[in-house]
Amino acid sequence: MDELVSLLHSGHFSCVIRKGAEIRTFTRSGVTDLLDVLEHDPDFLHKAQIADKVIGKGAAALIVLGQAEAVYADVISENALPLLEDAGIRTTYATRAPYIINRAGTGQCPVETLCAPYTRPEDMLPRIKEFISNLK
C-alpha cells in the first residue's frame, strides 16, 4: 500500500488502484472514476488495493460493491469507515473527519448527503448513478 500512497501524492492523482501487477491512476474529483470502474471493469476492483485522496460514504459504497481488498484514504468520513470495516476491507487513513466537505467548502459533500439515510451500498448505488448522470 505504501507504493500506492506514494504514487497518489507524487503524481497528484485523486485515486490509484492496483490489481495484481497492474496499476491505474485517476484524476477526476468525487466518485466518478470509482463509479466508471465499477460499471465498466468490475473485475479490476475485486480484491484490489485502492489509495484515494477522499473517501466519503458514497466512495465507500462503491468500494464495497467492487469488493476491494484494502483501501487507504488521506481523508475518510466517519460514515464511510463502518461500511468498509463491515465488509472486511482493510482500511487505513491519515485523517478521520465527521463528514466530507463540498468543493466550495460551505457544507457537506452532496454525495455524502444523499447516501446518509442508507445503510446498504446496494441502496446507495442508484442514487450515486443518478447524481453523476445529472452532472453530465
Image: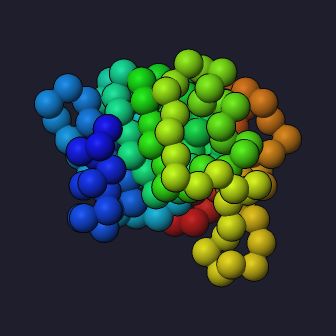
- Rendered residue at 45%/43% (across/down): 72
x, y (%) of residue 51? 39, 46
x, y (%) of residue 47? 36, 21
x, y (%) of residue 14? 39, 60
Q: Quadrant of the N terminus?
A: top left
Front residue (pair 31, 77) = 77
In screen coordinates, is 82 left or right of 91?
Answer: right
* Residue 72 in view here: yes
* Residue 42 in view here: no
Q: How is the image coloured?
A: rainbow
- Rendered residue at 80%/45% (across/down): 116
- Rendered residue at 62%/26% (across/down): 85
In screen coordinates, is 50 left or right of 64?
Answer: left
State the image quarter where residue 81 is shown.
top right
- Rendered residue at 70%/31% (across/down): 82
State the image quarter where residue 122 is shown.
top right
Front residue (pair 18, 78) = 78
In screen coordinates, is 88 left or right of 112?
Answer: left
Extreme-left residue of the structure: 21
